[in-house]
Amino acid sequence: MPRLVDASNAIGYRKVHPVLLMDREANHSIYLTMLLQRLGYRVWSANSAEEASDLSAMAMPSLIIVTVGIAQTDDLALVERIRSDRRTASVPVIALLPEGDLIGEQRCMAAGVRACLQRPVQTEELYRSIQRIVEPNPRRNIRIALQLPVSLNDEVLDFAAGECITELSAQGVNVRTVRPAPVHARFTLRITLGGRPLDADAVVLYSSWSDSDAVQGSGMGLAFERIDPEDQEYIRHYIREKVLAGLR
């Protein structure tokens, strides 16, 4: 059975960017905070302009997300204040607006907001917007950390010894193994996800080797070259359900 694990143990794990979330609605703030954490970001949460300003003064976030109510003057003023403050002027801002709030969107964009998303925000849309803004190599597909048995070229890796998939996305996997292959090597790959067997052809994008014989620290990142579109959509759905589990 797949087991969710700490993402920091995964091969290819990247820097965790701090995100400042400004949201006056307590329940929505809790939901967004947990969602952003599951997407791999460290979150500082504020429920007032003053608290958001104080947090920014203590440590600079990589991104600020502001939830704006319908034509809420105070929320829009906060966006303008963030963009005009020399300490935070260079920090990109995403505004979450009610559906159809064209006036709010126009004002936010005029204030220099990088993206305006409508509420309720879609998980993939939020993820891709953040990736595009803060990551040097943005991803389009959400990844989750897990431990999952895998076979490569019909050889089942030693799951008991720690050889397994450690990250999964709709575009590929990270595999921990004592025998990582060189870049451009190709494999046929088979996994069972949620009781469904999935097959794909994959190519190695990067590899890492440990200085010891231990499996920890050795592995490779594989991108799918061929996968059935229905299987790929199944993976995407599986990941979405894992990310949103308990949040709805």
Image: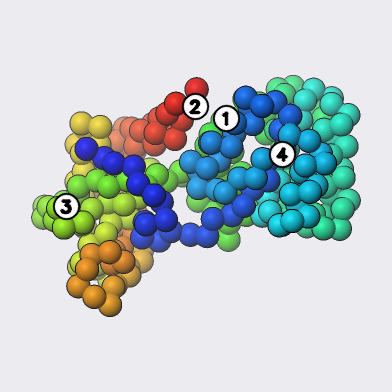
Helix, strand or loop at label 1? It is: helix
Which residue sits at x=65%, y=45%?
44
Vertical order, 159 against 126 (above or below): below
Dot placed on the residue nearer the N-terminal end, 1 or 4: 1
Helix, strand or loop at label 3? It is: helix
Q: Which mark is residue 31?
A: 1
Residue 57 location (% of width, % of height): 78, 55
| For the residues bearing labels 2 and 1, Cβ distance under 8 angstroms | yes
Q: Is residue 107 visible?
A: no
Mark 2 vs mark 4, foreground winner is 4
Residue 97 location (% of width, % of height): 73, 29
In the image shown, does 162 or 118 lie closer to the viewer?
Answer: 162
Q: Identify the residue at the far left of this view.
A: 155
Helix, strand or loop at label 2? It is: loop
Residue 118 location (% of width, % of height): 67, 28
Q: Which mark is residue 46?
A: 4
